[in-house]
Image: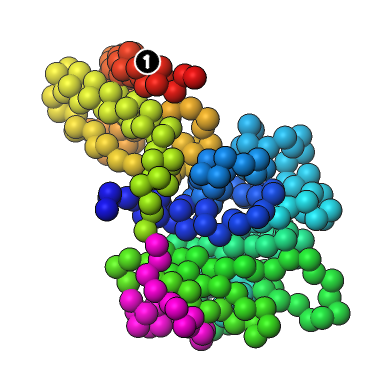
């Protein structure tokens, strides 16, 4: 089995839940759901429409969320994603306050929960702090009385440890599968609300080679860019500024990177809170040298990416 990142695993889980949706909308700062939607479209070679809120080229909107709400109100959003500081066993979510802390607020979560055809609840953290018996504040309810007009509701709850399905008739979650490295007993211990367990509850399927290959087709360009820039900074700056720390190369689902439509990386030239770094960051020569090494890395990336681009040409 090929190694995979936690984010890749969760994106694959989301892709498998999309089903027959024709239009999937993803809110701000949701890189894993967005990746899952894009993976589904790539794997099935279909015309799934994906609207990424707060991404200029990710949607056709001219007025942002206002148009998203209009589409949802017309029944033209088939699938949406919501999370929360707290989620309880009745699929209620809390985005307002918990443990004495105040959060930005519910925004349009209640409206989208009611109007989108299906909603996948997603939260990486799986603990009794998040999955509670009853939320402290209901930002968006998981179910409504029969007399309330409601088009949509929860489909599933995906966490970093397990997958639950929502049972509309009983208004309870059902544990469908447990992610690799975790157990049914562990899930019970770390979940604050009660739930049912599916008769066929087993381990969540790991990413297939095909899924990983599809996920990483464009990622290899970003990895190549990061590798070349890191190499130039490490060698060039090390020679010019021996006292500077060697930069680390890491991967993560950063908001500023996932919004890009091209290979992207984040370079931290130093930290103003570090005494030596702060001194160097005020030195024009240091900044010039850093820019030169970054430019060299980009140039090397351009040269090495050419064969890969040729492979993708029809």
Colour option used: rainbow
Does the magenta portion include 104?
no
Q: Residue drawn at (24%, 33%), measured in percent from left and top?
A: 247
175 to 61, vertically: above or below: below
Say above or below: 69 vs 310.
below
Is residue 198 within the magenta segment?
A: yes
Mark count: 1
- The answer to whether 309 is drawn above or below residue 14 in the figure is above
Left or right? Give the position of 153 relative to 207.
right
For label 1, count other residues whose C-alpha is less than 10 Å away and answer few (under 14), some (14-19) or many (20+): few
Residue at the spot 41% in from the left edge and 34% down from the top edge: 217
The image position of residue 284, as x and y in percent, is 32, 16
**In the displayed structure, would residue 184 be above or below residue 32?**
below
Q: Which residue is mark 1?
A: 306
Label 1 element class:
helix
Q: In x, y percent, where is residue 1?
A: 27, 53
Q: Is residue 279 visible?
A: no
Residue 274 visible from this viewpoint:
yes
- Looking at the rendering, the stretch of residues picked out in magenta corresponds to 183-205
Q: Quadrant of residue 310?
A: top left
- Residue appearing at x 32%, y 72% in the figure: 182
């Amino acid at each position: 089995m090929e190694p995979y990142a936690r984010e890749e695993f969760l994106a694959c889980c989301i892709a498998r839940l999309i089903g027959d949706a024709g239009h999937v909308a993803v809110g701000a700062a949701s890189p894993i759901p967005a990746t899952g939607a894009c993976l589904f479209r790539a794997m099935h070679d279909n015309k799934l429409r994906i609207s990424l809120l707060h991404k200029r080229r990710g949607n056709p909107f001219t007025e942002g969320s206002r148009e998203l709400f209009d589409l949802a109100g017309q029944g033209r959003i088939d699938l949406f994603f919501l999370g929360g500081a707290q989620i309880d066993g009745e699929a209620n979510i809390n985005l307002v306050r918990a443990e004495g802390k105040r959060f930005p607020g519910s925004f349009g979560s209640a409206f989208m929960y009611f109007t989108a055809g299906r909603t996948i609840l997603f939260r990486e953290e799986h603990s009794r702090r998040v999955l509670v018996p009853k939320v402290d504040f209901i930002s968006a309810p998981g179910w409504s009385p029969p007399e309330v007009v409601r088009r949509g509701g929860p489909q599933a709850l995906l966490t970093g440890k397990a997958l639950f399905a929502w049972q509309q008739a009983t208004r309870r979650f059902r544990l469908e599968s447990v992610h690799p490295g975790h157990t049914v007993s562990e899930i019970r211990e770390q979940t604050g609300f009660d739930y049912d367990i599916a008769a066929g509850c087993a381990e969540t399927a790991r990413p297939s080679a095909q899924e990983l290959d599809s996920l990483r087709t464009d990622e290899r360009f970003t990895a190549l860019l990061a590798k070349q820039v890191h190499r130039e900074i490490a060698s060039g700056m090390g020679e010019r500024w021996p006292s500077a720390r060697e930069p680390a190369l890491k991967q993560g689902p950063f908001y500023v990177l996932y919004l890009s439509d091209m290979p992207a990386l984040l370079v931290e030239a130093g930290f103003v809170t570090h005494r030596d770094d702060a001194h160097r960051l005020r030195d024009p020569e240091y900044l010039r040298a850093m820019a030169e090494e970054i430019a060299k890395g980009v140039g090397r990336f351009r040269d090495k990416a050419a064969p890969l681009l040729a492979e993708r040409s029809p």
